[in-house]
Amino acid sequence: MDQFAKEKRERSPEKEAWIANFYTENHLAYEAFPREVASPEQLRFMVYTEPEQLYYPCSDRTFNAIINKTDTDWLIMSYMKVWEKIKPLITSVIEDEYKKEFLLNLLHIKFRHDTASLVMLPSRIEKRLVHIFIRVSEIDRPLARRKEEMNRRVSALLNSRAYEEAINDRAGLSLESDSPLDEIGLRISFLKLKRLFSLAFNLEKVMATSDLTKEKLMDYMSTEVSGSGWDHLEETLRAWHRDQQWHYILWKSPLAGSILLDLEIIKLLVRFGVKVIISVKHAFYFDEITMADIMEDPFLADRFKIAEIITERNISKNDLLDKLKSDKTIFVIDDGTQERFNPLLTSVTFARAFKEADEVIIRSPNDAWCIERSSFSYTRNMMLRNLDVTDHLVINFKPKHPKAIRFSEADLRAKAEALIYHLKMEKRKGKTIMFYSAIVGSIPGQLEMAKKILKVFVNHLRQKHKDVVIINPAEHFEPGMDADDLMYMWEIVQRSGLIDIWRFQTYEDIEKAFELMGEKVPPEWVGKDATYSTGCTKEMQIAREVQKEHPEMQIIGPPWEKFLRRKEYGVGKLYDRTLGDIS
């Protein structure tokens, strides 16, 4: 039995209720807020969790303080730090004295109310107070002028002669007499990367310096950059440079001013065969960049002309991969949140970008705090700034969980192409190709039974039909694959034009399977067919499109009209979420 399942069994009903209350009070329970909170499948795109293991978007100390009702003084201090951020925001942005006093009192009342029970996460209180502030003040970008001024000054810095001379100075470039040109190019790039990371680390000091000469900039660029994260980045970039293939980095939560230095770093990364997905906040979160900043800040809008801005918050895997395979090398998405890193509330687009990335770089100290001080492992390697060092820059490395499996687009395409080759060989032998689409997990708690039904009925078809190759998708599943991976792989096969008959599961098929098993049809399976699966619905849409190109292909199964009850398949799901508002 898994340790987390064992721990759950050993918890008292009171403790279990307290944990459930923690998730509902913080609006983090998927069962209670399915439209706001990521499904367990979407969460597993980012966080590696064992069965029965609960994820919480905070440090272990914060979670234990709330659940175990201990460390109360420390929790209260964490709450006070939230108010210490909110109060100056109000006083610096609101000019009208009456409105300022009103907001201070309103938010303080809300703050006292939310902290009284000692069950709220400080980050969730912060988010709620910010949301109320924006709604009442009617200011969408409260710190816009300050952030734009920071971006203006950094933009001017990057355009200055002092910067150009400093970034290109030979000082610190270590070369041997026999160094090949390729190695010289790599060392120059790594030196520039270190200088830019160092400059971003010292940005506050840089902005406070009145006369920025080349020598002063060189000094700010020479801060030591070290740590396991830096070592990992250098090693990874060297490997990627050698393999001559595109790789993806997710660049998380850049800050005002620093984002322009980040962009210079990213341009260097592109030379190593890297495409970078920059993730910004969905809405205002202090000095962190939002999608509105990218669109409306003139200094960002100008420099981000080279990037593709992806505004869809619920992008499909296919659409995301199509964009990543384009000629663009820099992309911008928003993470769907207005708070520090919280995978439970990120958008589908962010979750899919995280899943497709080879590595993740965390630029925001607020995000790094949550990740560094929790015991959770993630599905991708992460590099983030060490928060406890002030005199030099240490980039930490948080390796992905050793059991985390990633199927890249190339991996999935290779599997699909191998199957297509096999089908072509079978067709040359005169065989007919049938693809069978069926419910795999659309009925909660019935995944194993669904697989059993599928296996029994497909074997029945194989015994009945001569010279017919029947594809049972469940037979090609590999550990680590989720529904997104499977749908992507199968769509390549399905659009190959090799399928002669595309059969969709009917209720009669299910009845026959139970008959062959010598069992009666249980209530949860009565009346079910492929139309109850959002995955099958997507496949019926594909089948209809394929049939237009290959009219000779037969489609057998429930009529198209019955499929209209579903309009999209769940994120990473092997079972469906009930979908409302069908258009």
Image (cartoon, rainbow, N blue to C red):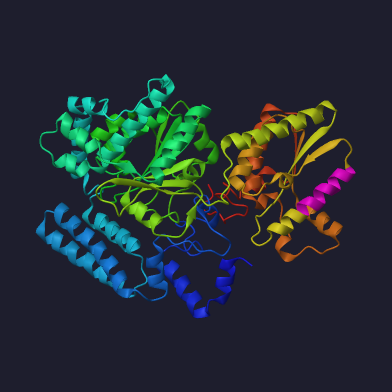
Q: Is residue 295 visible?
A: no
Q: Residue furthest front?
A: 177
Q: Residue at x 29, y 66 (%)?
A: 78
Q: Which residues are magenta?
A: 453-464
How far across and down, in percent of the image, does residue 53 sit?
A: 53, 63
Q: Is residue 193 left or right of residue 549?
A: left
Question: In the picture, residue 129 is in which quadrant?
Answer: bottom left
Residue 455 forms part of the magenta stretch: yes
In the image, residue 523 lies at what x, y percent?
A: 73, 65
Depth check, front residue: 150 or 185: 185
- Indicate left or right for 84 with 121 as reference: left
Considering the whole magenta stretch, tell me its main secondary structure.
helix
Which of 270/429 is in front? Answer: 270
At x 57%, y 56%, the residue is 578
The picture quadrant where one finds residue 393 is top left
State the image coordinates of residue 270 (x, y, percent, origin top left): 41, 29
Query: In the image, 167: left or right of 542?
Result: left
- Which residue sits at x=60%, y=49%? 566
